[in-house]
Image: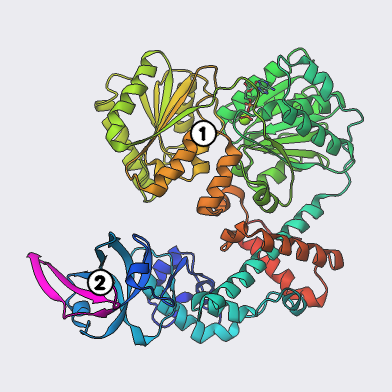
Amino acid sequence: MKLESDIRYLKGVGEKRAELLYRLNIFTVGDLIRFYPRTYEDWSEPLDIDEAPLDVPCCVRGLVDHTPTAQQIRKGMTIYSTRVTDGRSVMRITIFNSKYAAEKLMPGEEYLFFGKVSGNNYYREMTSPEIRPAKQGQKIRPVYSQTASLTTNTIEKLVSSALAQAGSEIGETLPDYIRKEYGLEPLTEAIKNIHFPADRFALDRARRRLIFEEFLLLQLGLARLKGREKTATPVVLKTDHSQEFFARLPFAPTGAQRRAVKEAAEDMKSGLPMNRLLQGDVGSGKTAVAAALIYSAAKNGYQSALMAPTEILAQQHFKTLSGLLEGTGINLALLTGSVKAAEKKKINAGLRSGEISLVIGTHAIIQDTVEFRSLGFIVVDEQHRFGVRQRGALFEKGNNPHMLVMSATPIPRTLALIIYGDLDISILDELPPGRTPVETYAIGGDKRTRAYNYVKKFLDEGRQGYIVCPLVEGSEEIDAAAAQDYAEELAKNDFYGYRLALLHGKMKPKEKEKVMLDFVNGDIQLLVSTTVIEVGVDVPNAVIMVIENAERFGLSQLHQLRGRVGRGKQRSTCILISDSPGGETRRRLEIMTKTTDGFKIADEDLKLRGPGDFFGSRQHGLPDLRFAEMLTDTQLLSLTRDATQKILAEDYYLDDPKNYYLRKAVEELFTRGGRGGLN
Ligand code: ADP
Ligand code: MG
């Protein structure tokens, strides 16, 4: 069987299972083989009863004391229970409804029980454990992400069969010389061990090999992307005029803003095109940085273009920049989908003649009809919303122009270096003085009504607020429907008589814009929303936010949401509601109540959850890293960085035959990630 064979043809997979596998993005036998376990059940080192931690899945060994007794507690519900012992302690085993499982337990025989132990120091119990005879061998079992009606056990069987039938087809991606130098096992072995490791040692080795590969390929690809764009540009700023611009501002720029402008201005003077990411928390003043550079470009005779993901954001930028650039003699225009044809014509003429120095807009500005006289500087706001293609289309309108992409998603530096490997980075790690941090409270669901009353107090004072809807883990349709119900409920009861509107992902862009605009204008008091609240929208009068199901969000996401308030002079409040007050949940949410520093929060998030969140492919358009959790392993990270540099120094285009597999794998990875080919 071939790795490319359709998964339908694997033994044990019919049409129906194939459909389910497709949903997991498994289309071929090779995809299944590369579908790595989400986690593992370690049966290899069973614990004694009193060693077993409470409420954490683990494997416990015990001798069955007596044949399980059955007790019917109601119709259709029978509980079987017995006791097991390790000679020192005793644990109760409870099994629901499974006569079959119960009858397999023989008194005097030793078994392994996998599950969560509950109880206290005097009493231990395990409910519905998985059970295996102790002598049947003890190993580490893979646990796969499952979908409806496709259990991890089924996937395990299918993977095993796929490996048996196509395992020999697995090629190698890392050249021998690399594997030798870094002590990495062959890919075939690593893949077998990642699914079915003999022991912890084998699992660690396999993991290390696979992460190494992933990091290496990613970094090689990014390094080449970065290198490719650096051909000389005719756009050279003779003089940096940003100081002049700063002097005009009604406020003193922060140290971070000055530094970022300086870094960018140096790029723009260098003769090589700038390709820079400006990262700064909400409110850190990215717009002023862009404005300084736009000013400087204009004084050097170059036009600039600023692209924002939505009409509202474009309008806001237009307003802000009109203010910042007032009296400078720099003409600017707003170009969005809703601009009238006659006006569009005028703007186009102004851009062609050079009379307009700055155009701000949505993707309307990448249309073919838009031409520039001398586009030298591009600013892209909230960059993750644009594909590389859109950035590219704007880029093509100039002659190798400079580019600044702005992002409000704080990402720890180590991570940023990888995700944005093709960009240089400037960070605004300092907020302008005089901001009052958003006061944040984490409360249980029992206090919901009080929270609502608190919100009403603000609304009554003429302020506005947000309520972020409960998360339903379903499709967008289900989420939208649930949000609808929730909003209707609020409108009928707790917020009866208030002007309230709903915003969710299934609404048409035009409808969303309308609601947002009404909110910006103050016609709506309370915006009930799923997580789609526009990033970057500035409504200084919105001072209160309630987030339902706060425990289901990553900290970084909570931070992003919270950034919608606290944008004016007024003190703002954010209330996190959570119905599951477990220890871990509380600890996480407490971080939110203690700091408003986005980078600190991102670091904590990384520690607590791994970087899955940051690497959610929607965010950056890069290939998914299946093993990115290892990012916390800085050693491996720097190892792969070294390897990348060594390889590229020797063979930049990877066309040495010894690097053939590497090149192929890099190209494949980047095509899969939707990033387009490399050459
Ligand atoms: P963001 O980085 O979220 O895009 P903005 O550029 O919208 O932030 O800036 C947020 C607010 O802070 C704006 O009202 C802006 O005028 C103001 N601002 C920016 N820089 C400074 C500064 N150095 N001192 C005081 N206020 C500033
Ligand atoms: Mg902004």
Instruction: Identify the secondary structure beneath mark 1.
Output: loop
Image location of residue 287, percent across then percent down: 68, 27
Which range of residues does the magenta coloring cover?
63-89
Does residue 68 belong to the magenta stretch? yes
| In this rendering, position of residue 529 left or right of residue 336 | left
Instruction: Identify the secondary structure beneath mark 2.
Output: strand
Quarter of the rendering containing residue 217: bottom right
Depth check, front residue: 666 or 116: 116
Q: CA distance from mark 2 to mark 1?
A: 56 Å
| Quadrant (top left, top right, bottom left, bottom right) of the C terminus | bottom right
Mark 1: give few (<14), some (14-19) or many (20+) Cα within 10 Å.
Answer: some
For residue 534, which numbered disc appears in the image? 1
Q: Amino acid at mark 2?
A: Val
For residue 90, which numbered disc appears in the image? 2
Q: Name the residue: 9% across, 70% down.
A: 71
Q: Name the residue: 75% across, 19% down.
A: 331
Image location of residue 273, percent across then percent down: 83, 42
Q: Are marks 2 and 1 in contact (CB under 8 Å)?
A: no
